[in-house]
Image (tube, helix red, strand yellow):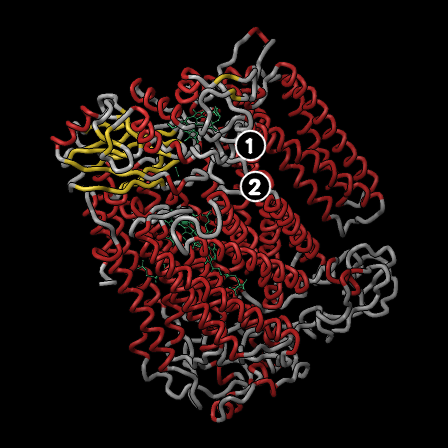
């Protein structure tokens, strides 16, 4: 990597890059302000970030895989109990949430698209819609949870089912299903919450004008993350609600 | 001598299963020792021979693919052989012979309880006839324990909520040491026991006498038995002292000194008078009434026949 | 790191020759630094403190065993001591020790880059580690845990405060601590993977990567793939204790053996997180002190990946007596033997590297050779345990304790301390007292063997582990072992004093005190903020002694010969810290040519008959007898 003069502006937000007495130059040079000091080229920085994100997403998948294995094992041991307990979940709300999340995944992808073409307003708009969908998801989830609390469909010692829909009765060990249900949806919900946080942060940076046709890595990465959150739900919904 | 596994590294062997496992141990031991000596020897030799010397250059490393393949494949062949014999032995040792005597083994904090086919129970000590195949059926009342009989070379976890099995045939007369090999809390290391391997005749005699008060008992084993003295023997054998002191000092369970005939404060409900019924209930159904301040430890369930319960009550009564 | 910590005012590139330890000082310049070296140093200090803490717990454990019955503590305290010893050593010390502490400093330098790919993530991982450690300390202040480092359910998950059968100890903060520290480990792994893939200096092809990098790369893969499974397991365990989930607790319908499968699915690969970086360090040390490329470079590199992958398939060997089917046991036993192969490949290649090398026994090399010997014992005894029929007897005895100390202390700690000796001059710019280093090594080596060889014997004779009390017949063995552990402690104490002395008044270290051909030795000691004065271009492998120029080796062969002729002369006189360029080639024309070769995918290191030597004007004429013994080596 050469050490030629590098533009650095006062809006400098990335960590200290810049050659001695570099004049505040415009964007689009070989060493734009968002290029961190230890990268040679924007392409290298983008590829690295993307690779890092993929590694992180694989990690996320394995994190959830533990829960899926639990689900698989207990389902194979107690298939009847799983079917009975699963009937107590609200398919309508679950289905609505699936649509909400799928839609938000679309808007996240559109945000990346508009950011690639340098359309700042559209990017902001899509990011906001994505966040709103995420919030809607959580609101619906809240009502679902509240219903579970009211009817006592809870894990372990808190399991006291009553007033179940279609007057059903649950097997004694159905609390295991709800343990798994709350763990899976809970951990997923935390991911949604974190997602809202990072999308908000990316949105603010977009508003501030950090991104351009050349530099949109954070938008890209946050969308990848959001697709993963969506993907996990795509598996959770049929496993918990439908089958 | 020190290098020889059979005399120095392994305990006495007392079961039909032990010799085959020991033979495997010796195989892998000598195998490893040879590899270790070769590797270390070569290393030391090279270090001495090729110490940095004036004017002598290291030879440049070349591609030695054939050599690499050689030392990838050769150990693999060794390992396949070792694996094969070890697995055969394992399967052979794991299957119980037809008509084996079934012994229930229950692990509980912190003692082993044994139930013979005739329903008699005993704790800490187990008596087995020599040369008769035995099948242990293990379970646990609380956390995971592991039933380990050193001289038999057998070990298996006793997992709460499921049964597991051990097949073994004692072949030598004498005593074998029982350990608990899975960590189970405070007195894990005191969860010991003894297997007495005896002749068939002695075994039958033992079964007959087990539920009756013996002629003699006590510390020396030669005192004239009284109910209280027998109670004390049972108390010690069943592992009660791992939780209860009898001298008034407090552990994770109430001391039994001076309990009888006094009011006991409970976590729930009014105080109760510690009479015969209370003590009986405390022993046979410990969760029914819980003494105040002792919710951190759970007393395990015990099953005693009436004469034994009477003896224990007599003993508790005697603790003034 | 001025420009980093104060981005809005720092419009100047730091002085390219200023050491990373110089420049900005003061606490803020450390705790907000994004420089991988400073982060690495902070990690190094943290893991060393953790090691000393774990060591003190170990000495208390050993002291309790001086006599049978009570010696200095009661049973509950003992159970907490060995659990804390295990937890601290595994989660606070050994997992971050080589990758996060040493790797952080060395990896970017060996790659010829300025920093790791994500410096902020790097700093974050340090803070996550420290937050996790704080939870651990909180648990210790509240009495610690007595579950062992394995946290087996239902003992750990069933809270007697809610009528459970488990332990009343402070399990929750401790499992949370391990959970949190897991993320620190994952982030380091993510960072290293991206760095190795994308940040290599021009000319640094995969075939030229130092073996330490290969090892860290393999480790990172395990960290990213295995640690999240531990995280979710500990989360389930925590929630089970907290809310009574009933997934692992049989009294609530759960299955405790499932917990063990989950736990070992992480923790067996984790033992390769522990050992593989140590193996990487040893490869570097052996190459440097034998002045020779490690034999079978590609095999050694690939065996790291092999361990990483096969390591995922063998977790069941910890459950042979826990109730699995014969057929599952068979598969796990077979796969267990399979992991011995890549380890064996490494051991054989290290030994072969010594053959016809030019071996110098400076202190790092002693640790390297010690590693080979002790790891071989540890690994071979692992085979005893992998044999189904033998493991039934040996499981959960001191034989297992001795096995894993031979691999973890005899392996990883040896590699860690050896690496510390090896790179100390680079990290700190100071030399240490070689004599003290040897004394320390002798105590550690002897003390270690006395401690743990004895444990093999009492273990195979039936002494179970995690025992507060023991039968009188084991007393002699325990006493010998305890005395050994005191020698061991004394050895580490000597080393601690030695390193502190070196910091306070060690002689300044030369750029390349060991005469190594590897890249990290081509930059000043300690390195400047951006690691190199000018950005390096790589034209040969890190072990190509035949291509290295005299300037690169710092002391040419002639100088070296003079030094050997007049022994005992300290090598610090050769200190010319800033005199050298940082390219791995002294000659631009050659550099360009070799670069072109590298571009074309042709590997200059694999030049079969050494013709390349002639093409390199700076290379020494070497090897008096090149062909004389070709025959016996192939
Ligand atoms: C990296 C991992 C690591 C390391 C380095 C060690 C190091 C040591 N270990 Fe440990 N050990 C474990 C990991 C490790 N251990 C694990 C995972 C367990 C299982 C726990 C469980 O069952 O859950 C275990 C269990 C364990 C046991 C079994 C306990 C039991 O089952 O009852 C014993 C017993 O001897 C032991 C001893 C030692 C000793 C003597 C050292 C020595 O090497 C320590 C040397 C270090 C020092 C001594 C400190 C440094 C020096 C100073 C502070 C200077 C001052 C000191 C003096 C002057 C004396 N360890
Ligand atoms: C750094 C950590 C580390 C490493 C590298 C290893 C390496 C190995 N381990 Fe170990 N192990 C532990 C740490 C480690 N282990 C710990 C902490 C425990 C206990 C956990 C607990 O319960 O608390 C444990 C427990 C453990 C068990 C369970 C024992 C029990 O509880 O019953 C088993 C069983 O198979 C085992 C096997 C092996 C094997 C086969 C290897 C192999 O990878 C070794 C391979 C190496 C060699 C074989 C030597 C070099 C090869 C040659 C010189 C070639 C010649 C060899 C041949 C021809 C084969 N280990
Ligand atoms: Cu029971 Cu240990
Ligand atoms: Cu393992």
Residue B56, x across and y down, in percent: 42, 88
Q: How many marks?
A: 2
Label 1, on which residue?
C241
Residue furthest to the top? A167
At a point 44% along the width and 50% down the height, the residue shown is: C309
Distance CA(mark 1)–CA(mark 2)? 10 Å
Q: Secondary structure at mark 2?
A: helix
- In the depicted view, which residue is nearer to us: C173 or C124? C173
When the figure is inspected, residue A182 is found, relative to residue C565, above or below; the finding is above
Local crowd size for mark 1, using a 10 Å CA cut-off: few (<14), some (14–19), many (≥20)? many
Local crowd size for mark 2, using a 10 Å CA cut-off: few (<14), some (14–19), many (≥20)? many
Q: Is mark 1 within 8 Å of ligand 1?
A: no
At a point 33% along the width and 77% down the height, the residue shown is: B45
Asked if marks 1 and 2 touch (Cβ < 8 Å), the reply is yes
Label 2, on which residue?
C175
When the figure is inspected, residue A140 is found, relative to residue A198, above or below; the finding is above
Confirm whether residue C197 shows in the render: no
At a point 39% along the width and 20% down the height, the residue shown is: B284
Placement of the C terminus of chain B among the 4 image quadrants: top left
């Amino acid at each position: 990597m050469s050490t030629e003069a590098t533009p650095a502006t006062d809006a400098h937000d990335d960590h200290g890059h810049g050659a001695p007495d570099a004049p505040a130059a415009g964007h689009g040079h070989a060493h734009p302000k968002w290029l961190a000091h230890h990268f040679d080229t924007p392409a290298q920085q983008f590829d690295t970030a993307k690779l890092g994100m993929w590694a992180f997403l694989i990690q996320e998948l394995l994190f959830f895989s533990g829960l899926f294995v639990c689900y698989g094992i207990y389902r194979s041991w107690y298939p009847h109990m799983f079917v009975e307990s699963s009937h107590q979940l609200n398919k309508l709300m679950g289905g609505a949430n699936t649509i909400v999340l799928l839609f938000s995944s679309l808007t996240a992808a559109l945000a990346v698209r508009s950011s690639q073409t340098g359309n700042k307003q559209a990017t902001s708009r899509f990011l906001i819609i994505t966040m709103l969908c995420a919030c809607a998801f959580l609101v619906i989830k809240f009502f679902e949870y509240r219903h579970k609390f009211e009817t006592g469909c809870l894990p372990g010692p808190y399991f006291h089912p009553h007033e179940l829909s279609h007057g059903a009765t649950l097997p004694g060990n159905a609390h295991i299903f709800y343990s798994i249900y709350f763990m899976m949806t809970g951990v997923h919900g935390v991911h949604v919450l974190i997602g809202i946080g990072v999308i908000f942060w990316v949105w603010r940076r977009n508003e501030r004008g950090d991104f351009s046709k050349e530099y949109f890595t954070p938008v890209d990465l946050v969308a990848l993350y959001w697709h993963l959150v969506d993907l996990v739900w795509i598996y959770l919904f049929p496993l918990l609600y439908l089958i | 001598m020190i290098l020889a596994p059979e005399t120095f590294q392994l305990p006495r062997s007392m079961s039909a299963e032990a010799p085959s496992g020991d033979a495997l141990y010796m195989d892998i031991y000598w195998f490893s020792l040879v590899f270790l000596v070769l590797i270390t020897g070569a290393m030391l030799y090279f270090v001495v021979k090729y110490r940095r010397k004036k004017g002598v250059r290291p030879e440049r490393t070349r591609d030695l693919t054939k050599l690499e393949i050689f030392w990838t494949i050769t150990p693999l062949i060794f390992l396949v052989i070792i694996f094969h014999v070890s697995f055969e032995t394992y399967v052979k040792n794991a299957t119980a012979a037809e008509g084996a005597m079934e012994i229930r083994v229950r692990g509980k904090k912190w003692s082993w309880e044994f139930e013979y086919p005739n329903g008699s129970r005993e704790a800490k000590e187990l008596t087995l006839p020599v040369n008769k195949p035995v099948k242990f059926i293990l379970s646990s009342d609380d956390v995971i324990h592991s039933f380990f009989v050193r001289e038999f070379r057998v070990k298996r976890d006793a997992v709460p909520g499921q049964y597991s099995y051990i097949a073994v045939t004692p072949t030598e007369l004498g005593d074998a040491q029982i350990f608990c090999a899975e960590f189970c809390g405070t007195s894990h290391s005191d969860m010991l026991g003894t297997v007495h391997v005896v002749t068939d005749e002695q075994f039958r005699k033992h079964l007959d006498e087990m539920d009756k008060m013996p002629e003699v008992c006590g510390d020396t084993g030669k005192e004239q038995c009284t109910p209280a003295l027998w109670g004390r023997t049972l108390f010690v054998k069943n592992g009660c002292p791992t939780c209860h002191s009898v001298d008034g000092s407090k552990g994770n369970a109430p001391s039994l000194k001076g309990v009888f005939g006094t009011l006991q404060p409970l976590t729930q409900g009014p105080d109760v008078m510690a009479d015969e019924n209370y003590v009986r209930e405390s022993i046979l159904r410990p969760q029914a009434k819980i003494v105040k301040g002792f919710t951190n430890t759970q007393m395990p369930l015990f099953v005693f026949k009436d004469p034994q319960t009477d003896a224990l009550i007599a003993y508790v009564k005697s603790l003034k | 790191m001025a420009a980093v910590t104060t981005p809005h005012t720092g419009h100047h590139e730091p002085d390219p020759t200023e050491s990373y330890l110089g420049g900005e000082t003061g606490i803020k310049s450390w705790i907000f630094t994004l420089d991988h070296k400073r982060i690495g140093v902070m990690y190094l200090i943290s893991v060393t403190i953790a090691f000393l803490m774990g060591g003190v717990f170990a000495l208390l454990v050993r002291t309790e065993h001086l006599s049978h019955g009570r010696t200095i503590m009661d049973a509950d305290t003992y159970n907490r001591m060995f659990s804390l010893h295990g937890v601290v050593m595994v989660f606070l010390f050994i997992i971050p020790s080589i990758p996060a502490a040493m790797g952080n400093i060395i990896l970017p330098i060996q790659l010829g880059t300025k920093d790791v790919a994500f410096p902020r993530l790097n700093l974050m991982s340090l803070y996550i580690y420290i937050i996790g450690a704080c939870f651990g300390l909180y648990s210790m202040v509240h009495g610690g845990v007595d579950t062992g480092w394995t946290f087996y359910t239902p003992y750990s998950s069933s809270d007697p405060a809610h009528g459970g059968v488990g332990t009343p100890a402070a399990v929750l903060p401790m499992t949370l601590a391990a959970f949190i520290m897991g993320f620190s480990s994952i982030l380091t792994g993510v960072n290293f993977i991206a760095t190795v893939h994308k940040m290599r200096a021009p000319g640094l092809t995969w075939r030229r990567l130092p073996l330490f990098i290969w090892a860290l790369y393999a480790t990172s893969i395990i960290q990213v793939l295995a640690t999240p499974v531990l995280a979710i397991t500990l989360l389930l365990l925590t929630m089970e204790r907290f809310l009574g989930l009933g997934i692992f607790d049989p009294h609530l319908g759960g299955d405790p053996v499932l917990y063990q499968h989950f736990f070992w699915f992480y923790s067996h690969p984790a033992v390769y997180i522990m050992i593989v970086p140590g193996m990487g360090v040893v490869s570097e040390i052996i190459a440097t002190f034998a002045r020779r490329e490690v034999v079978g470079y590609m095999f050694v590199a690939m065996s790291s990946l092999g361990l990483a992958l096969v390591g995922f398939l063998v977790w069941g060997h910890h459950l042979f007596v826990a109730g699995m089917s014969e057929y599952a046991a068979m598969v796990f036993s077979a796969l267990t033997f399979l992991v011995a192969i890549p380890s064996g490949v490494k051991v054989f290649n290290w030994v072969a590297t010594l053959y016809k090398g030019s071996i110098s026994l400076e202190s790092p090399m002693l640790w390297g050779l010690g590693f080979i010997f002790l790891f071989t014992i540890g690994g071979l005894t692992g085979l005893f345990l992998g044999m189904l029929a033998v493991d039934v007897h040996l499981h959960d005895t001191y034989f297992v304790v001795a096995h894993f100390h031979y691999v973890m202390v005899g392996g990883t700690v040896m590699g860690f301390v050896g690496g510390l000796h090896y790179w100390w001059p680079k990290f700190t710019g100071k030399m240490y007292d070689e004599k003290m280093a040897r004394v320390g090594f002798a105590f550690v080596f002897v003390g270690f063997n006395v401690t743990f060889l004895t444990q093999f014997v009492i273990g195979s004779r039936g002494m179970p582990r995690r025992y507060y009390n023991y039968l009188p017949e084991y007393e002699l063995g325990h006493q010998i072992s305890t005395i050994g552990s005191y020698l061991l402690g004394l050895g580490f104490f000597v080393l601690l004093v030695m390193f502190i002395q070196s910091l306070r008044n060690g002689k300044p270290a030369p750029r390349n005190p060991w005469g190594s051909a590897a890249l990290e030795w081509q930059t000043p000691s300690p390195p400047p903020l951006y690691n190199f004065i000018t950005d390096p271009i790589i034209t040969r492998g890190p072990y190509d002694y035949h291509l290295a120029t005299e300037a690169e080796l710092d002391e040419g062969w002639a100088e070296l010969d003079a030094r050997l002729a007049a022994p005992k002369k300290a090598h610090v006189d050769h200190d010319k810290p800033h005199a050298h360029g940082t390219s791995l080639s002294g000659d631009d024309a050659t550099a360009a040519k070799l670069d072109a070769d590298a571009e074309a995918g042709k590997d200059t290191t694999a030049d079969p008959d050494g013709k390349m030597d002639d093409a390199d004007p700076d290379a020494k004429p070497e090897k008096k007898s090149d062909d004389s013994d070709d025959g016996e080596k192939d």
